[in-house]
Amino acid sequence: MRQKLGQFRAVPRFAIALGLVGWIVRSVDISSVSRAIRTAETAQLCFGITVLLAAAASTVFRLRALVGPGLSIGECGRITVVNYFLSQVLPGGAIGGDAYRAIRLKRTSRSWPGVLTLITIERVIGASLILLPAIFLAIRAGVFEGRATSFSGVGLALEDRRAWIAGSIAIAALALLGVFAACHGTSRLTVWVQEVLTTAKDVSPQRYGIVFSLSALFHLLRLAGFLLLIDSLHSHIEVGEVVIVLALNVVASSLPISVGSLGVKEGTTVIGLAAFGVPTTTGLAVAVLDRLVLIFVGIVGGLVFWQDLRTPGTATPANAGREAE
């Protein structure tokens, strides 16, 4: 019954993905996209794809630095490629990939709070290194100047929106803590908080520095890869503008509304690049090439995942509930 329910929940994501892909195909001339890729500077195009692959590979070393010596670099590589498979190919999205990582890291004698803390630390550091610069560049470029967002019929200035967002996050966090306390009791909540703080303290400043540096390297490689692809397609864009587009990609990829963010990520890339003067044909070509890189890494992860399924006792999302108990 639970398996059928999970399959049913995946149907809307497939529908959304197909709808978004259909909208993109109708909005952009696909033959022009194919022609743009064929007439691109081959050497620069291949170099850009290689740089994007290097960015994906850097996440292996970031996970190894965060976890510490308790996990080999080979195991970190297996976890990372399967994470790409589950998050970019299957309907689970980022949540499915992180669930698999949590299960595998749990096997290194860590508690669930400790495992979730490590994944959260990696997510927060990685996202902040691209979102904060993008927000700064957007504000400096005057993207938000003279604009107001309407919410329930009330016009909100920029300062009011910031306060509203911060208050909403605080209220949501308190609500989650309240629900947890009501379900498990305050003593269980106290234990979880203590384990989270202990895990965060156990990560040495040196390891935090390495994770920070590798996260910065990941975004710099992604930035360089996008610039190379755009240049190879005979278009031009400023570095700061690509940073904003990549930040939008991060946000779009985190939304669990599509299969592997298919359509969402591509639409964000096309619209974001078009906002800075890049033709929609070039934008879609870049999005397609970026997706092909992710699919390639995901296929490798799928092969590893298939091997894990054939290995008795290997942790998979299917037995996550049993391990959590």
Image (spheres, rainbow, N blue to C red):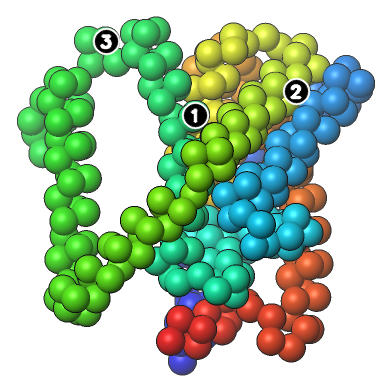
Find numbered disc 1 in the image and state the secondary structure of the residue it sits on: helix
What is the distance, in whole Å, between disc 2 and disc 3 at their CAs?
31 Å
Q: Residue at x 38, y 58 (%)?
A: 198
Residue 178 is labelled as: none
Is residue 131 at least partly visible in the picture?
A: yes
Q: Residues within 10 Å of mark 3 (few under 14, many from 20)?
A: few
Relative side of 248 to 191, left or right:
right
Q: Tell me the kind of residue under disc 1.
A: Ile
Residue 97: image x %, image y %? Answer: 57, 61
The residue labelled by disc 2 is: 229
In the image, is residue 321 above or below residue 37? below
What x and y, as percent, mark residue 238?
59, 9
What number is the disc on residue 130?
Answer: 1
Q: Which amino acid does the dot numbered 3 rest on? A: Glu
143 vs 177, left or right, is: right
Mark 2 crowdedness (10 Å alpha carbons): few <14, some 14-19, many ≥20: many
Between marks 1 and 2 in the image, the one whose residue lies nearer the viewer: 1
Residue drawn at 12 percent across, 26 percent down = 160
The 10 Å Cα crowd at callout 1, few under 14, some 14 to 19, many 20 or more, is many
Residue situated in front as seen by the camera: 39 or 99:
99
Q: Amino acid at mark 2?
A: Leu
Name which residue lies at 49% across and 30% down: 129
How many numbered marks have been drawn onto this rendered protein structure?
3
In which quarter of the view is residue 209 placed? top right
Q: Circle 3 is placed at which residue position?
A: 145
**Secondary structure of residue under mark 2:** helix
